[in-house]
Image: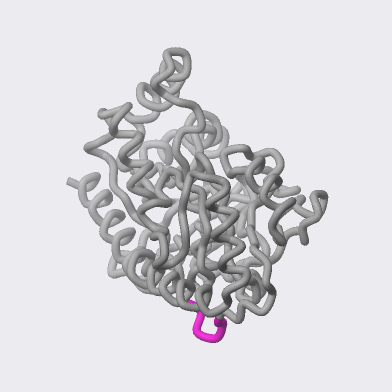
Amino acid sequence: MNPKNKLRIFAWNVHGTFMSTLVKTGHDFYIPIKRGRPYNYDGKTRGYRWPRTARQISVPEIRKNKYDLIIFQTPQQVFEEQYKVLSAEQRKLPKIYIVHSPFKKDPRRRRDRKELVRHIVLDMIPQIDAFVHITRYNLKQWTTFFPETKKKSVVIYHGIEIPKNIRWTGMDARAVNVTNFLPGRPECGNALWFSMSKKIPMELYGMESEKYGGTGPVQNRLLRKKLARYRVYFNPTVASSVPMAMLEAMSVGLPVVSMKSTELPYIIKNGINGFISENRDILKNKLNLLLSNKKLAEKLGKNARKTIENKFSINEFIYKWNKLLGEIIKKKNI
């Protein structure tokens, strides 16, 4: 992708799958890296395919470079990291904040709301030109509790490429899930996964999963080929955003059995591309149904693939991002 007006964008990388997709917009991305690859400074995450327009930049070189726009993905980057690595002039550039996940704490609670208002609304909003939400659920949550963000907010769904040479086989009659550090992430449904894995044959991929009977991490470029052999994808998420791994599984034809939470009811439709429920017994029964009925799993899996084509088009993702970037730069230049 070669946009008409190519920009020089500085962006920290904290989500390898998302960032490796965002760089496909065709702009020149400068991604900071430190020795040891600590959080916020992972550079180009290993195991992904990166275009030449994505460049790693060491911290000493950051202030020497010229950029057109800054992208943030965590509050820490807004409140701390930019002051450590960017010059005063660079901090005046247009800024985008990507909202990956809903609030882990309920902002309606007095103490939590006070904390969120102080750190997010009062401090962050004046600095940010646009908040990009990856789901409608995130947008609704933010604009309900913090209406000050509404005028600056937009939704751009994930962009998922449909692999041409990978197709679901379902030969392995087990469910599969991909989550990094699952034991320490209650929002990702760790309790539900561990409970269900005692009753249903399952495989778990992700960092540190081998400590709990899983297979361990898998390079992203190999992930979908591995996922394609499983019968169904099980998503236990209870308070997190839409898992990229689930969407990638759907892109190769896996049906999904999912906990009903956040954005997921807009994506998973009962009896169409999978099953979704808040009832654990129903989830268990639907998993057993698909594990024992390969034809049904294949039928729902084909629809899951169509869902990705229709709702998570990579071309639509690129178009919307380039449109937003162009609008922000134009406003700043007026």
User: Is residue 38 one of those drawn in magenta?
Assistant: no
- In x, y percent, where is residue 53? 49, 67
Find residue 169 and report its horizontal and vertical position in percent. Answer: 60, 81
Colour scheme in use? one colour
Foreground pick, 59 / 114: 114
Q: Bounds of the magenta span?
A: 162-167
Residue that appears at 47% across and 49% down: 277
Q: Residue at x 29, y 30 (%)?
A: 144
Please tell me in which quadrant of the rendered image residue 288 appears: bottom right
- Residue 287 position, x and y percent, is 59, 61
- Please identify the quadrant where the N terminus is shown: bottom left
In the image, 328: left or right of 63?
left
Judge whether residue 205 can be spotted in this image. Answer: no
Q: Tell which residue pokes out farthest to the bottom in this image.
A: 165
Is residue 85 in view?
A: yes
Q: Nearer the viewer, residue 80 or 7?
A: 80
